[in-house]
Amino acid sequence: MPSSARRAAIAGVSSVITLVSITACGGGSTASTGSADKLPAAPAAQRLAGVCPKTIVVQVDWEPEAEHGPLYRLVGPGYTVDTAKKRVTGPLVVDGKDTGVDIQIRAGGSAIGYQSVPSQMYVDKSITLGTVTTDVAITASAKQPVTAVAALMKKSPQVLMWDPATHPDWKTIADIGKSNAKIVYVDGSTYASMLVAKGLINKSQLDGSYDGAPARFVSNPGIAQQGFATAEPYIYQHEVSAWKKPIKYQLLADVGFNVYPEALSVRSGEVKSLSPCLKKLVPVLQQSAVDFAAEPSATVKVISDLVQQYNTGWVYSEGTGTFAAKQMVKLGILGNESDGSIGSFDMKRVASALKTFTPLVEQSGAKVKPDLTAKDVATDEFIDTSIGLKR
């Protein structure tokens, strides 16, 4: 999912909610409380020293948030925060044990000039992994090819939302399409073209002027609006003072938006050279996802701390993060694939996404790599199928 479309929905809420106090930070690095000196060593299977870079650098597509929780859970005590470059560095830990290397997570958005993650990965070769959604990988395939090695989320949390009081007859996105209501979204979002192509909505309904602020929805609840199941249901009911009531929505994933959102990806030409590292690192990432799903609170606090230290204007309360973490598990956004493992890919689904989104990406003017295959975009080579959420 494009980061601009992904996050505008939350960023604009600051105009009408009560914000937590954020203290401006200086331009240098600051150390958090805690120390990594006495961390026990991870088991041999999870020791990354000697096979991975001394610092595993992860470029994410936006500000700290719960959708990136499995990554931030890897950041151990004693981490440092660079408030100028918007990045956090600390020992890479799993289950409280030191893997022998550090992890650095770099914020996206304004911190990288709103560039795409693949473009940043090719500008800065120190980046080990980037979070790249399937349609973005297709868009970048000709000049900045990336291959996903682990799915950060099983399915997209993106939704179309509406006011149930104004539209009690709307149950699905198809119901919106049967009306004349405007659908307010961020112009250029791939999912909109998909919905039109599938005949679920009419092109004439699309209004690409969404700026992230809730004011229009509040003042005109007759519209439908883009949003995220991990944010808007909580924010509109609890934090938008002019609303303070439930909304309804349908996941775009339920109507064909079958991308893997923000999948952890490497430059395609480096899959082989990074293979010894990825064989150990990917199962560590999978285990971190399991651990975050089971107990997200400590990680949500880290995310809240980083949001306040970065002080970019990004609004993300601890309440939103707590809601998002629970909602991801509840809705299967963070969950096992059909093989029972977390972080894996259904390669038939990847192939289906290529079939759906390649023509839409080309219609937007982007050049797609000729004969692009599912194996170019994602691989299950490094997945440990024994690691998954226990039900």
Image (spheres, helix red, strand yellow):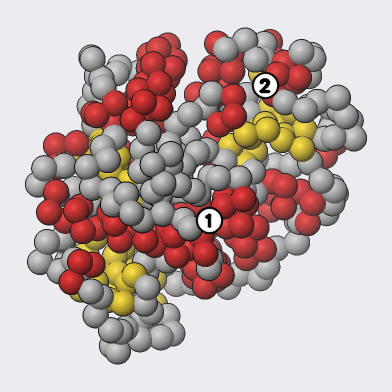
Among the 4 quarters of the image, the one containing residue 33: bottom left
Foreground pick, 23 / 58: 58
Residue 140 at least partly seen: no
Foreground pick, 295 / 15: 295
Earlier sequence position, callout 2 versus callout 1 = 2
Camera-nearest label, 2 or 1: 1
Determine which of the numbered discs, if any, sits on residue 391 in the image.
1
Q: Amino acid at mark 2?
A: Asp
Residue 148 at least partly seen: yes
Q: Are there few (<14), some (14-19), or many (20+) residues within 10 Å of tag 2?
A: some
Foreground pick, 1 / 28: 1
Q: Secondary structure at mark 2?
A: strand
Give residue 225's position: percent from left, percent from top: 70, 31
> On screen, 33 above or below 197?
below
> On screen, 82 above or below 249?
below
Determine which of the numbered discs, if any, sits on residue 304 in the image.
none
| Residue depicted at x 52% and y 27% | 257
Name the residue furthest bottom: 38
Mark 2 and mark 1: Cα distance apart in space? 42 Å
Among the 4 quarters of the image, the one containing residue 177: top right
Give residue 179's position: percent from left, percent from top: 79, 15
| Residue depicted at x 76% and y 19% | 175
Write down the residue under mark 2.
207
| Residue depicted at x 15% and y 69% | 49
> On screen, 362 above or below 239?
above
Relative side of 68 to 344, left or right: right
